[in-house]
Image (cartoon, rainbow, N blue to C red):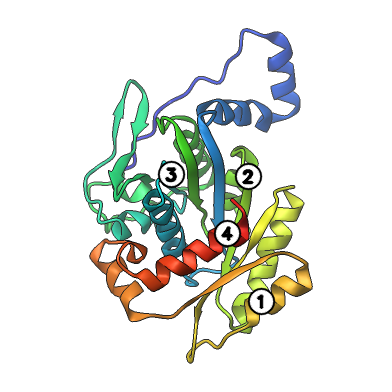
Amino acid sequence: MVVIISIELKSANPNAEKAASENPFSQYREIVKKNLSNVGKVIAVHSGKGGVGKSTFSVNLAAFLAQKGFSSGLLDADIDCPSCNKMFGITERIKSVDGKFVPIEAFGVKVISAGNMVANSDEANVMRGPMMFKLIFELLAKTDWGSLDYLIIDLPPGTGDNPLTVMQLAPLYGIVVVTQPQEVAVVDAKKSVNMAAKTNIPVIGIVENMFGTIFGSGGAENAADSLEISFLGKIPLEQSIRESSDAGIPDVIKNKKLAGIFDSIISEAAI
């Protein structure tokens, strides 16, 4: 069972109370913004569909930033099916101290994942919308990140409640969209871009993942051109990335070719 930390959303300021009643999200946003005030840039990673390697990209991006000397954190906001903890090799449970979640550090990255909130990693996080919203809010509002240069948020795929909650609550610098080159994935990637536009969040750019013989190449770049957004680069479908993920090690740490790709992506994104 996931342990939820209760938060009283009350204010001594009647004007703030009135504003909150008129715009229920405003008070939540302010609490999250205050908690993340020591984070330089909050960057979300999103995909229109699952299975395109979004979480693998998020893990390696956070690890690469740490390798470059930046203070880096990763929030796995995919509450239903978290996987970032596995890819970082983290098995211990998350603890709370003085009402705050304490991130677990791995490879220089501070990590919070719902996968570390249950005794058994195979246990399903079965929740309806209100409970899911509350957990996402409390992960954003009650995690002690300390001071960070970057916080990477691995969003759930799709355009439903969970990614929308993060987009509405977190002070996002921007969103990176990850897709495969095949047409069915690119169609959904365009939905990610449109969702960001509707929530007034800048799209940093699009990344083509798993390009090669099996899935082809070029679909994401064509989509970026048609949507008039930046194409950040492409990552090949490689066995070493899968093996490292299964072993709980971000491949970018030991794969010089992949590190070079991420260096290029960072430069192109200008983050």
Q: Is residue 64 above or below residue 103?
A: below
In this figure, which residue is indicated by the disc labeled 1?
A: 221
Observer-nearest residue: 137 or 260? 260
Residue flagged by tag 1: what amino acid is it?
A: Glu
Q: CA distance from mark 4 to mark 3?
A: 15 Å
Q: Label 2 to label 4, Cα distance in Å?
A: 16 Å
Note whether residue 71 is visible. yes
**CB atoms of marks 4 and 3 within 8 Å:** no
Residue beneath label 4, please? 267
Work out which residue is located at the far bottom of the displayed protein and give it: 213
Precedes in sequence: disc 4 or disc 1: 1
Residue under label 3: 70
- Cα distance, mark 2 to mark 1? 22 Å
* Element under disc 4: helix
Give the camera-side residue of 143 and 228: 228
Q: Which residue is mark 2?
A: 173
Classify mark 2: helix, strand or loop. loop
The count of marks equals 4
As helix, strand or loop, the secondary structure at mark 1 comes to helix
| Residue count near mark 1 (Cα–Cα under 10 Å), binned few <14, some 14–19, many ≥20 | many
Could you tell me which residue is drawn at 49 percent across and 31 percent down?
141
